[in-house]
Image (cartoon, coloured by chain):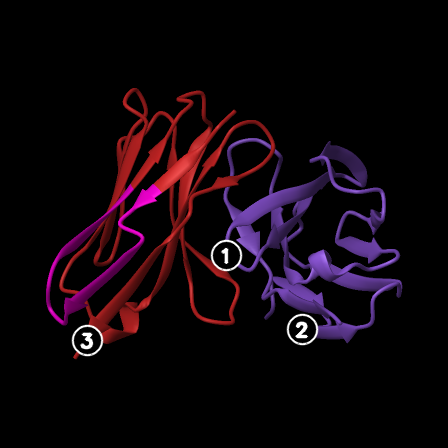
Chain colours: A red, B purple
Amino acid sequence: KQEVTQIPAALSVPEGENLVLNCSFTDSAIYNLQWFRQDPGKGLTSLLLIQSSQREQTSGRLNASLDKSSGRSTLYIAASQPGDSATYLCAVRPPQKLVFGTGTRLLVSP
Amino acid sequence: DTAVSQTPKYLVTQMGNDKSIKCEQNLGHDTMYWYKQDSKKFLKIMFSYNNKELIINETVPNRFSPKSPDKAHLNLHINSLELGDSAVYFCASSQVSGGTEQFFGPGTRLTVL
């Protein structure tokens, strides 16, 4: 059974810092891994999708890496801003569904 | 343009009632999903439909019945609502059921009193 864990559960940083969010999964048989952000009371916004054959994806200040063999992914956020404050979720895709991690709640203070 | 939409956004009802949540996607995707986010914010798959056919049912009680009239719609009907059904329900869609990106709706917050 696939299990996804995210560390840390919560993170508070001052504006401008670079930070790393971690995601680990127990079964390396995945199609892809997707990072989302969720704002309070809102839906999920897809940030990055990494296919199982890829090692990283970049979008603006975000960079996500995938090491399938070790069951790990990281989301790197450069020059963090208060607008980055949200809960970040990673999800892995075995066939046909997403299995979500527990989330990291990020607070970036001005 | 709303890609994945859900109605209603909020739903408050009494125990024992029957209610429905509607989902529509205008992305031309083949596969749609229902997820449940509990009070601890943990998201879990409930159902998945591909071209109107059920492909995933994750041990959800029979009181939950998804209905897909066409591939752009996946509605969720819940019978005999219980307190434990209170959660946020998210609809999502993807191009195919394999390795493509999933897009999520805004969620429906269901509160059962």
How busy is the neighbourhood of tag 3: few (under 14 within 10 Å), some, or many (20 plus)?
some
Residue B30 seen from this side: no
Residue B110, above or below A90 = below
Q: Residue at x 43, y 68 (%)?
A: A39
Q: Quarter-wise, where is residue A16 in the image?
A: bottom left
Q: Residue at x 31, y 53 (%)?
A: A9
The residue labelled by disc 1 is B40
Q: Position of residue A69 (x, y in %)?
A: 30, 20
Residue A41: numbered disc: none
* Residue B6 among magenta residues: no
**Chain letter behind tag 2:** B
The residue labelled by disc 2 is B9
Q: CA distance from mark 2 to mark 3?
A: 30 Å
Image position of B94 (left or right of A34): right
* Residue A14 among magenta residues: yes
Pointers 2 and 1 in contact (C-beta within 8 Å) = no
Over which residues does the magenta segment extend?
A6-22
The residue labelled by disc 3 is A109
